[in-house]
Amino acid sequence: MEPNSAIAPANAAGRSSVALGLSGRYATALFDLAVDAGSLDTVGTSLATLKDALAGSDDLKALTNSPMVSRKQAAAGIAAVAGSLGLDKLTTAFLGVLAGNRRLGTLSAIIRDFTALAAARRGEISARVTAAHPLSADQQQALAAKLKAGLGRDVALDITVDPAILGGLIVRVGSRMIDSSLKTRLDSLGQALKG
């Protein structure tokens, strides 16, 4: 079942700039279902829990990305994961649809797009942040406040940890990017030294 039938968005008008492509269609479908069910915050919390689990578990990454896992195995595995994480019923059912459609590989992008849709509904701008290490709650609040001061709107942070950037942050808001990562600075220094 692709997202053009039972889980398709009833009206995606005005959201196409927020969520594009396959992951955007699935995220919009889940978003619309969550709005209709009055469980937008619950689904958002479940997806945040799932995002953290994906970041911390190589086994879960393998389950969602391996072409060697059958649809049946993926459905059983993702149902077990949803149960152990205590995800809500709508998110659990949605994950079953993804497993049945062999779309679990797009899960991270779907979570990102859903987060952007939820932020837009709250009147916020979504900022994708890549950090070398997990940010504390105080660091997240300080970053959100700095971005709000610069952008003039509330900002929802979508944080990904990537140790490869060594230090600093990469912040993307719409088409704008601020790259203060140590890796980029070292690369620039290396290019300057080559002359």
Image (cartoon, grey):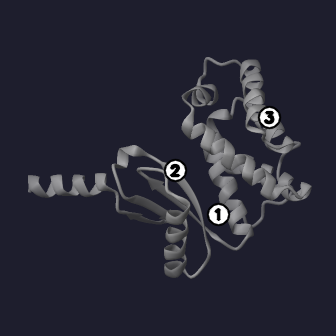
Residue at (52%, 58%) from the top-left corner?
136
Give the Cα separation between the discs numbered 2 and 1. Answer: 22 Å
Q: CA distance from mark 3 to mark 1?
A: 24 Å
Tell me, yes or no, if residue 30 can be seen here. Answer: yes
* Res. 160 mark: 2
- The answer to whether 148 appears left or right of 76 in the picture is left
Q: Position of residue 81 (x, y in %)?
A: 72, 31
Q: Nearer the viewer, residue 50 or 28?
A: 50
In this rendering, the answer to whether 186 lies above or below 142 is: above
What residue is pinned by disc 3? 97
Task: Report helix, strand or loop for mark 3.
Answer: helix
From the viewer's side, name the closer residue of 166 and 195: 166
Q: Height in image: 71 above or below 83?
A: above
What is the number of the mark on residue 17? Answer: 1
Quadrant housing the N terminus: top right
Question: Badge 3: few (under 14), some or many (20 or more) residues near its Cα, within 10 Å?
Answer: some
Viewer-closest of 185 and 138:
138
Query: x, y (%) of residue 47?
Result: 70, 47
* Residue 54: % across, % down: 60, 38
Q: Tell me the kind of residue under disc 2.
A: Thr
